[in-house]
Amino acid sequence: MRDESISRRRVLFGGALVGGAALSGAGFVGGVAFGRAVPALPERRAPHELREPVSAERAWAALSAGNRRWMAGRARHPHQDPSRRRYVATSQHPYAVVLSCIDSRVPPEVVFDVGVGDLLVVRTAAHTLDPLVLGAVEYGPEELGVPLVVVLGHQRCGAVTAAAHAIRDRVTLPGDLQRIVEALRGVYTPDIERMIAAHTRDTVARLRPLLPHVVGARYDLDSGGVTRLV
């Protein structure tokens, strides 16, 4: 891994869990060219699936298309059969890393309607970061050439809600749960949804010095939709 990345990581993270801050967002491309190619995807592709070379822009487009299918109740469940299992048994070429919350209602493979070998998924409470989690996120771009990282927050996040209440009431949560509180203290606001969005944007800001293409998004539990935040 690059020396400059290692030094920046030490400055940014220093062994502690990370918290957040806010911004508003819009579309993904915005005239920015993306470009790292990765190995070819399997030979049995449906029209909606990615074709090589894979860029960050096209990876996000594929995830967005899958999410629209999930929202509409038309999920295709691609890459979930024995032939796909056999294909990826000896190598993997995922096209996105998703850092998301552990919430049982937000499984990234389901939300984006993908299958085996498509995503590297890292999940922590409120997608909080520490050095080990950061290493897991970096693995995809650094070792496998994955072109895109998605930080996925979600509506009514229980971890953010618990942390906000602890900060508001000045209480200490038991055991290591207090680490989540400290990770989120910097983005505290009484408005939980604003705090969730702020934390997502801040996580993206902390990852971008180390990784080339990072998107922040929000999952809506009611509609099933994913909205780009940054």
Image (spheres, grey):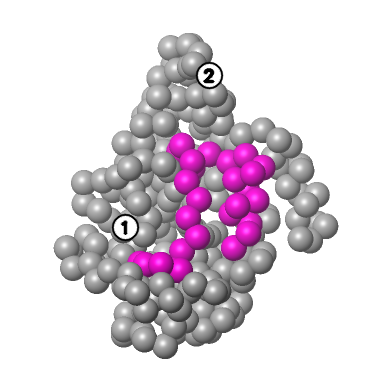
What amino acid is at disc 1? Val
Residue located 51% across and 79% down the image = 54
- Mark 2 or 1: in front is 2
Camera-side residue of 47 and 189: 47
Which residue position holds label 2? 175
Residue located 52% across and 84% down the image = 40
Which residue position holds label 1? 111
Q: Is residue 180 visible?
A: yes
Left or right for 41, reference 83: right
Q: Residue furthest left?
A: 73
Left or right for 214, reference 193: right
Q: Are marks 2 and 1 in contact (CB under 8 Å)?
A: no
Q: Position of residue 158 (x, y in %)?
A: 36, 32
Neighbours of disc 1 within 10 Å: few (<14), some (14-19), many (20+): many
* Region in magenta: 114-140
Left or right for 30, reference 135: left
Image quarter where the N terminus lies is bottom right
